């Protein structure tokens, strides 16, 4: 996926890479969400060519091939056709421009957020590639806030949170790509800056830990319109933290849930084995 910063500008081989798995998601038009599909070729330098994996049915691999690593050595044809069409439609110039815009978008967003958050892993020119990391560890100590608290509050702004707790458990990985316009990037940055201000209010005691506008997020329409409101902030602050939301509000449908518990415990809504057997 990191080829999003290189295509048309450089390549893994040019910068000294021996082998890479070239993900097609994000860079070549395959959806990024849902954990996949993790589709893409394995590329290697000339000296590793003899060891490319073989296959007992489909002729492939080098002279000293290792065993197969996939049942389908050339991936899923139906998925690969999407990337083929994407490449054909954009062409070399369009793909190169995509990389340039992705780089510009990420560095613009980073420059806006750097005065408010700790940015990790920039180069000697204080620049990033197509993505950057903000470390939220300081807010755990100062305000009792975790990464997921920031992610949930973003939903009140109508924004899907970026990648959370990776590659650092305390971080957000932000990658605008070439597909986000300036207006959307600015709205995201405005939201993150506003949440930073709310976190400061918690750190300074203006809002209590554990019962505040961030730890209670997201705020559904049902929550905001209930007759009994005892929270230490207003309904307006909960639902309309920035002005544009008054005319363009996407309401979250579910309030705070325990993500970790849900990940560790399987809830099946399908019929029981017994009822299916009776049918």
Image (cartoon, rainbow, N blue to C red):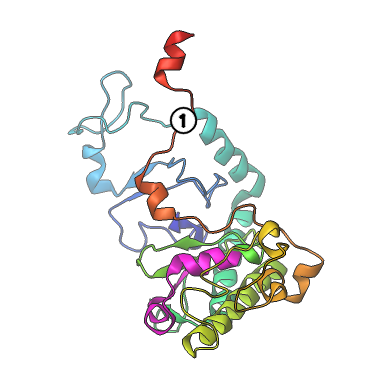
Q: Is residue 143 magenta?
A: yes
Instruction: Tell me which corner region of the image, top left, top right, bottom left or bottom right, holds residue 234.
Output: bottom right
**Residue visible at 63% across and 78% down?**
233
Left or right of residue 223: residue 270: left
Query: Of helix, strand and loop, which one carries label 1?
Result: loop
**Residue visible at 42% across and 80% down?**
139
| Quadrant (top left, top right, bottom left, bottom right) of the N terminus | bottom left
Q: Is residue 140 visible?
A: yes
Instruction: Tell me which corner region of the image, top left, top right, bottom left or bottom right, holds residue 155.
Output: bottom right
Left or right of residue 99: residue 143: left
**Residue visible at 37% across and 70% down?**
170
Q: How many marks?
A: 1
Our reading of the magenta stretch's main secondary structure is helix
**Residue visible at 59% across and 63% down?**
218
Could you tell me residue 125's position as x and y percent? 44, 84
Instruction: Tell me which corner region of the image, top left, top right, bottom left or bottom right, holds residue 100.
Output: bottom right
Could you tell me residue 138's position as x and y percent? 39, 82
Q: Is residue 100 visible?
A: no
Farthest residue toward the right? 247
Query: In the rendered image of this protein, does residue 173 appear above or below residue 3?
Result: below
Farthest residue toward the left? 64
CA neighbours of label 1 inside 10 A, class few (<14), some (14 to 19), many (20+): few
Task: Give the camera-side residue of 34 and 83.
Answer: 34
Could you tell me residue 27's position as x and y percent? 52, 52
Residue pointed to by mark 1: 76
Left or right of residue 10: residue 160: right
Could you tell me residue 217's position as x and y percent? 57, 66
Report the magenta residues as a range.
130-154
Farthest residue toward the bottom? 204
Left or right of residue 50: residue 33: right
């Amino acid at each position: 996926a990191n080829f999003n910063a290189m295509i048309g500008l450089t390549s893994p081989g040019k910068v000294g890479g021996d082998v890479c798995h070239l993900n097609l998601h994000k860079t070549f038009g395959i959806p990024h969400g849902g954990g996949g599909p993790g589709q893409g070729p394995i590329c290697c330098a000339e000296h590793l060519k003899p060891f490319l994996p073989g296959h007992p049915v489909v002729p492939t691999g080098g002279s000293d091939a290792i065993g197969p690593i996939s049942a389908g050595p050339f991936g899923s044809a139906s998925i690969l056709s999407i990337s083929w069409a994407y490449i054909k439609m954009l062409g070399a110039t369009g793909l190169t421009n995509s990389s340039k815009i992705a780089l510009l978008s990420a560095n613009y967003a980073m420059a806006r957020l750097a005065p408010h958050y700790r940015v990790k892993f920039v180069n000697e020119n204080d620049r990033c590639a197509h993505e950057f990391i903000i470390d939220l560890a300081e807010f755990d100590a100062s305000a009792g806030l975790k990464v997921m608290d920031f992610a949930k509050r973003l939903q009140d702004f109508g924004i899907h949170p970026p990648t959370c707790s990776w590659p650092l458990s305390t971080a957000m990985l932000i990658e605008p790509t070439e597909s986000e316009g300036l207006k959307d990037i600015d709205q995201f940055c405005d939201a993150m800056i506003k949440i930073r201000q709310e976190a400061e209010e918690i750190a300074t005691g203006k809002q209590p830990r554990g019962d505040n506008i961030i730890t209670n997020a997201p705020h559904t329409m049902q929550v905001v319109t209930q007759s009994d409101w005892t929270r230490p902030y207003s309904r307006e602050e909960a639902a309309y933290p920035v002005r544009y939301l008054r005319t363009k509000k996407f309401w979250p449908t579910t309030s705070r849930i325990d993500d970790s518990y849900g990940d560790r415990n399987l809830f099946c809504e399908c019929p029981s084995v017994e009822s299916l057997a009776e049918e």
